[in-house]
Image (tube, helix red, strand yellow):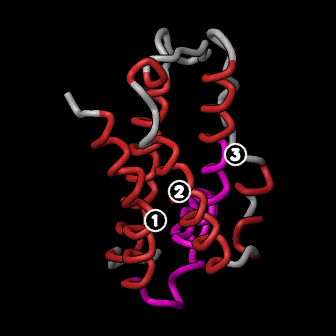
């Protein structure tokens, strides 16, 4: 089983992986959407920066209350319509990185009991701090993978 420390390690490396992937991408392609209803690399990156504070808020909630109810995150409709395209990428990346640094410092201090703190999530029969941060890692990697796909894509039809 992946240890809590390894989950935190993955949480920690995501901002650098994101920066590396974006740096490898042709600048003129950063904001290009592969289809009208699909996000660009710019949007995937800013989405990660946008949702990242949610994890700290949920952690606070889960540590402070017994089995609280968690509300699933749904991206705002304006994000789907391109609102992230007008936001500053550099600022978003800096915000993501600094937020992650604070989160990692905090996660490294959590004891085993804190990692097992549960919440009620409408989509999952079981949900706790460990699952939440494992999901955070998977979420980061999903969006990084989408950026990698966009970077390597040959046909932009």
Q: Circle 3 sits on which residue?
A: 75
Look at 51% across and 59% down and name the residue there. Answer: 101
Q: Secondary structure at mark 1?
A: helix
Could you say where residue 78 lies in the image, as x and y percent from the top left? 80, 55
Q: Which residues are magenta?
A: 25-54
Residue 44 within the magenta-colored segment of the rendering = yes
Which of discs 2 and 3 lies nearer the camera? The answer is: 2
Where is residue 22? Give x, y as percent: 45, 78
Q: Residue at x 75, y 59 (%)?
A: 81
> SS at mark 3?
loop
Mark 2: few, some, or many residues within 10 Å (few <14, many ≥20)? many
In the visual, does 119 lie left or right of 4?
Answer: right
Q: Which quadrant would the N terminus be assigned to in this image?
A: top left
Q: Is residue 119 above or below residue 154?
A: above
Question: Is residue 152 or residue 94 the one in the foreground?
Answer: 94
Q: Dot 3: few (<14), some (14–19), or many (≥20) neighbours within 10 Å?
A: few
Q: Are marks 1 and 3 in contact (CB under 8 Å)?
A: no
The x, y position of residue 46, in whole percent, is 62, 65
Instruction: Give the residue pinned by disc 1.
Output: 15
Q: Which residue shows up at 74% across the image and 74% down it?
A: 87
Mark 1 or 3: in front is 1
Pointer 1 with pointer 2, Cβ within 8 A? yes
Q: CA distance from mark 1 to mark 2?
A: 8 Å
- The answer to whether residue 111 is magenta is no
Q: Secondary structure at mark 2?
A: helix
| Residue to which mark 2 is pinned | 100
127 vs 60, nearest the viewer? 60
Task: Examine the rendered structure and indicate whether residue 7 appears above or below residue 37.
Answer: above
């Amino acid at each position: 089983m992946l240890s809590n420390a390894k989950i935190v390690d993955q949480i920690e490396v995501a901002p650098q992986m994101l920066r590396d992937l974006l740096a490898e991408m042709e600048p003129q392609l950063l904001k290009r959407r592969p289809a009208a209803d699909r996000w660009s690399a710019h949007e995937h990156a800013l989405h990660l920066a946008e949702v990242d504070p949610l994890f700290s808020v949920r952690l606070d909630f889960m540590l402070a209350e017994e089995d609280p109810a968690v509300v699933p995150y749904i991206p705002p409709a304006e994000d789907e319509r391109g609102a992230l395209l007008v936001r500053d990428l550099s600022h978003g990346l800096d915000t993501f990185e600094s937020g992650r640094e604070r989160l990692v410092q905090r996660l490294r201090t959590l004891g085993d009991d804190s990692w097992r703190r549960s919440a009620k999530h409408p989509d999952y029969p079981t949900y706790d701090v460990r699952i939440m941060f494992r999901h955070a890692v998977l979420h980061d990697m999903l969006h990084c993978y989408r950026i990698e796909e966009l970077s390597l894509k040959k046909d932009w039809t």
